[in-house]
Image (cartoon, grey):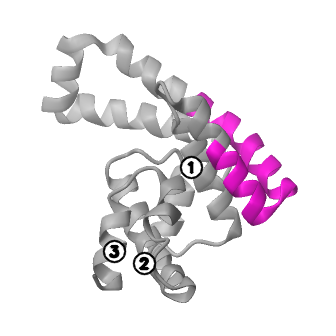
Amino acid sequence: MNTAELAKQLSEIDALETWAGRCSAIDKWDRLEVFKVAEKLWLERMAESRKLLLHPGVLDQLRSQSWETNDIHKRMIWASVLASVEGSDSKVRFKTIKNLLLNKYGRDWWEDVYERKTNAWAAKKRIRKQTALHGSAMNTLINNTHLFSEAAEEERELALRMISKV
């Protein structure tokens, strides 16, 4: 399998922390190249599917930079991933991500991500609350009318603006 195919496959996996395990058989340098390509594809897909909990200004910046990230962006992205962890295995995933980030970047980096997670989680909670309040009739209106869909999108953007840009 070539690196482009592997990058495409990885980009379809929401759980970033599992990527390394899926590439353990390839050379370190090839793996770094695959991750770089996959990261861009993953970011674009997650933004399009509205799964990324990032400030709208940060999303615009990433989009304009062809999804090229810097250190602060990576911290924001990992905070979004942490805030999105849910389900029966959420504690295990959280610990796995924490250990991965501690080993790769160190305690200060982890603590910054952990602190950023709080605002991402609050934005997620606000978005969910708004969605739950709508009900099926309102969701039909939102999905089928321009006016209501714009209002819902504005509310989502307000929630995401709760997340820091820096």
Residue span colored magenta = 96-123
Residue 3: percent from left, percent from top: 35, 83
Label 3: which residue?
6
Q: Earlier in the sequence, mark 1 or mark 2?
A: 2
Q: Which quarter of the figure has residue 25? A: bottom left
Q: Residue at x 46, y 17 (%)?
A: 129
Identify the residue at the far right of this view. 108
Disc 2 residue type? Val
Q: Could you tell me which quadrant the N terminus lies in?
A: bottom left
Q: Does dot 2 land on a helix, a strand or a loop?
A: helix
Position of residue 110 relative to residue 151, above or below, is below
Label 2: which residue?
37
Residue 154: percent from left, percent from top: 41, 36
- Identify which residue, 126 or 151, lies in the foreground: 126
Disc 1 residue type? His
Identify the residue at the far front of this view. 25
Residue 159 visible in the shown view: yes
Label 1: which residue?
55
* In the displayed structure image, the side of residue 24 where residue 1 appears, left or right: left
Q: CA distance from mark 1 to mark 3?
A: 29 Å
* Residue 121, numbered label: none
Q: Earlier in the sequence, mark 3 or mark 2?
A: 3
Position of residue 7 relative to residue 54, above or below, is below
- Identify which residue, 155 or 42, lies in the foreground: 42
- Identify which residue, 38 or 21, lies in the foreground: 21
Q: CA distance from mark 1 to mark 2?
A: 23 Å
Residue 124: percent from left, percent from top: 52, 31
